[in-house]
Amino acid sequence: MSPFMSLFRPHDIAGQASHMPTKRIKAALGAAFAVIYGEIALYLSNVVQT
């Protein structure tokens, strides 16, 4: 199995996640959600204006 494919095995991902500090995970999720919500807000404002 190639190293790239091992990224998609759930138990490996869970094992890697358990070693990561939760603060970094929460910060990354927070940043991702902020970007997603920002994109949605921009899209909706464009739709309303047209």
Image (cartoon, rainbow, N blue to C red):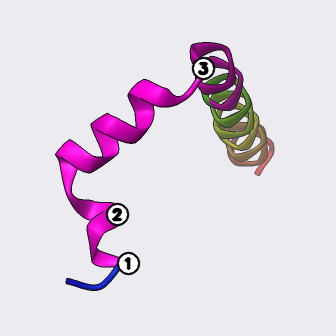
Secondary element at image label 3: loop
Q: Nearer the viewer, residue 20 or 32?
A: 20
Amino acid type, residue under disc 3 in the picture: Pro
Secondary structure at numbered mark 2: helix
27 horizontally vs 16: left or right: right
Q: Picture coordinates of residue 40 (x, y %)?
A: 65, 39
Question: What amino acid is labelled 1 in the image?
Answer: Phe
The answer to whether residue 50 is above or below residue 17 is below
Residue 49 pos. (x, y %): 80, 43
Is residue 10 placed above or below 30 in the rendered structure? below
Say which of 41 and 13 sits in front: 13
Residues marked 2 and 3 touching at CB (< 8 Å): no
Report crowding for label 1: few under 14, some 14 to 19, many 20 or more residues within 10 A (C-alpha). few
Dot 1 or dot 3: first in sequence order is 1
Where does label 1 land, which residue? 4
At label 2, the amino acid type is Leu
| Residue 16: x %, y % from top left | 41, 40
Magenta portion: prevailing SS class: helix
The residue lying at 27 percent from left, 49 percent from top is 12
Question: In 3D space, how far apart are the residues under numbered discs 1 and 3 (Cα atoms)?
Answer: 23 Å
x, y percent for residue 30: 67, 22
Circles 2, 1 touching at the beta carbon (< 8 Å): yes
Residue pictured at 40% horizontal, 25% vertical: 18
Q: Earlier in the sequence, mark 2 or mark 3?
A: 2
Image-based side of 18 in relation to 36, left or right: left
Left or right, 24 with reference to 3: right
Answer with the quarter of the image where residue 21 lies: top right
- Range covered by the magenta-colored residues: 4-28
Give the label on residue 7, or none. Answer: 2
The quadrant of the rendering that contains the N terminus is bottom left
Residue 15: in magenta span: yes
